[in-house]
Amino acid sequence: MAQHGTAIIGMMEVEGELNYELEEQKIQAIRTSNLNTIQRFLTSVETDINATRQKIHSRMLSMCEEKKKLQQKIEDTRQRIQQAEAKRSRDKEEVQQLERELERLKIQLQGKKEELEAQKKVLATCMEEIKKKESLVSETKAENQEKMRQAEHCIELYKKYLGLDIICLQNTLVLKFTQVSQINPEAEYMVRLGLEEDKYTLLGSEPPLPSLPQLQEELNASGNLLACLVQIRKLFQRME
């Protein structure tokens, strides 16, 4: 009988280890998915940055070319004026027309200069925004890595000290406790936990706990999930 009992306990331990290994594989898959999402986000930001830089660069090249053309036109106009004055073969009206054309071109050139200066300011602003986005991406990546590390650490603590098994169902976690009842250590006690927009929701428990609303309020105030699970375990133990 003693040998038979020892064999049963061994089988239960192996089964528990298999469940833990399966949950750890699920957690690893979630972590990989999060890292892939971050990578796609980084790639998208990098593509936007490169597209903005190329667009501004092309615009500045175009404006510089227009500036050169205007300068050439001004030079051509000046030469025409000089030729007209030298030959004195053209009447006063033509000279005045050329002078008006010269003034118009000067105004256009000044406008292009001002537009070029404005584009330089836009470029400087874009570069500042790019730096902010790059900094935000770096901070977001670091924060997500830290959250994943903390989550893995917490899960290991839950498994070790609370006999806890975690099942992920979309935005809901099903938390199953064992080793609660001294009479029946294998008996399962369950609580369902939801998380949306950084807010926890205790959706229900089995057996029912009347104090779930109060526990939910304390959990959202402190953010200490481990302490909340320890309290829930104690409440299950008191129900024996």
Image (spheres, helix red, strand yellow):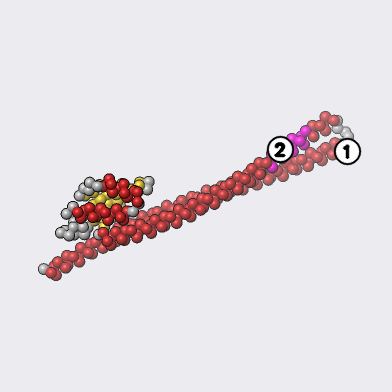
Q: Which mark is residue 108?
A: 2
Mark 2 residue crowding within 10 angstroms, few (<14) / some (14–19) / many (20+)? some
Quarter-of-image position of residue 238:
bottom left
> Residue 177 versus residue 69: which sits nearer the camera?
177
Q: Which residue sits at x=72%, y=44%?
A: 68
User: Mark 1 sits on what residue?
Assistant: 86
Quadrant where the image shows the N terminus: bottom left
Quadrant where the image shows the C terminus: bottom left
Residue 90 visible = yes
> Residue 24: horizontal and vertical position, in percent?
32, 59
Q: Secondary structure at mark 2?
A: helix
Amino acid at circle 2: Gln
**94 up-or-down from 131: above or below:** above
Q: Which residue sits at x=62%, y=45%?
A: 121
Q: Earlier in the sequence, mark 1 or mark 2?
A: 1
Mark 1 residue crowding within 10 angstroms, few (<14) / some (14–19) / many (20+)? few
* Highlighted magenta segment, given as a residue range: 100-113
Residue 62 visible = no
